[in-house]
Amino acid sequence: MKRNIFALSLLLLGWSLSSAADLKTLFIEMPDSLLPTLTRSERMDFIDYLESGMRARVRNKLDGESEMILFEENRLVVRTSGAGRFEMVLFPKKRGGSLICIIRTVTARYNDSRLSFYTEDWDPVPVGNLIELPKFDDYLTNEALKADSLAYFKKRSILRLQSVTPVDGALEFCYTSLDYIGEDAERYRSWLKQDPLRYIWNGKRFKRK
């Protein structure tokens, strides 16, 4: 009896691992609405070019050029335009399968990123269920928090952009819009943390380190 239970456990584990979708399949089969400038066929072309050892470039719907600039086991990056970047990252879940993280970044003068999350069936997962996004105060140093003119600084920092980078099972956030303040930006540079804010994935949620 114990032997049968053990065998069944191995069978279920093997089925779970084999049923987990790989990054290539998820990228090709994802809804067009998540990357509207590229069709399913063009996403397939990216993979074909890479597997053939070629540079992965295609013409997009806006008649511009898009290029897949990174493809790893659990992460890919597509330069969608001169100012846009699309990233897909897989984070392993504790009970099997992966959480799909999509990062869209637009660069005007500085990077501004937006996060969204999905199941492997492409059902949206509310961001708030997975991570408490950094607030402006999280970027401030002790020097800033003790300054008499902090309220004035916050008013001048109404435009608050941040970039997001996936690194080793984590997401790292950086404040990117200090220089929008203008000529006094350098005066306030020491008021903002230089190291990124790091959020570790624990299989269920992202936790601030």
Image (tube, grey):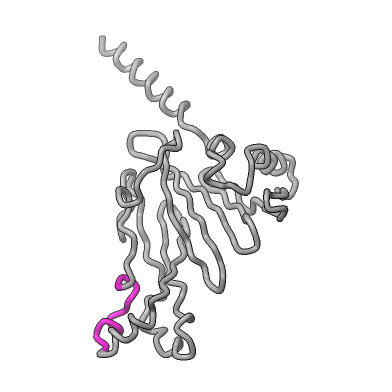
Q: Where 110 sits versus 39, above or below?
A: below
Where residue 88 sits: x, y (%)?
51, 48
Q: Which residue is drawn at 49% across and 33% down?
A: 21
Q: Where 82 sits versus 18, above or below?
A: below
Q: Where 182 sits versus 173, above or below?
A: below
Where residue 129 sits: x, y (%)?
30, 48
- Determine if the magenta segment contains residue 141: yes
Q: What predominant SS class does the magenta segment belong to? A: helix
User: Which residue is more in the foreground, 86 or 77?
Assistant: 86
Q: How many labels does the image show?
A: 0
Q: Quadrant of residue 5?
A: top left
Q: Which residue is drawn at 45% across and 61% down?
A: 164
Q: Which quadrant of the figure contains the N terminus?
A: top left
**1 left or right, relative to 109:** left
Where residue 120 sits: x, y (%)?
44, 35
Q: Which quadrant of the figure contains the C terminus?
A: bottom left
Where residue 192 sits: x, y (%)?
37, 78
User: Which residue is more in the foreground, 129 or 31?
Assistant: 31
Magenta-drawn segment: 137-147
**76 left or right, relative to 98:** right
Q: Where 206 sits versus 98, above or below?
A: below
Q: Which residue is drawn at 52% across and 35% down?
A: 22
Q: Quadrant of residue 64?
A: bottom right
**131 left or right, relative to 165:** left
- Which residue of the protein is positioned furthest toward the top in this rendering? 1
Q: In which quarter of the image is residue 99?
A: top left
User: Which residue is more in the foreground, 135 or 192?
Assistant: 135
Q: Residue at x 31, y 79 (%)?
A: 141
- Determine if the magenta segment contains residue 84: no
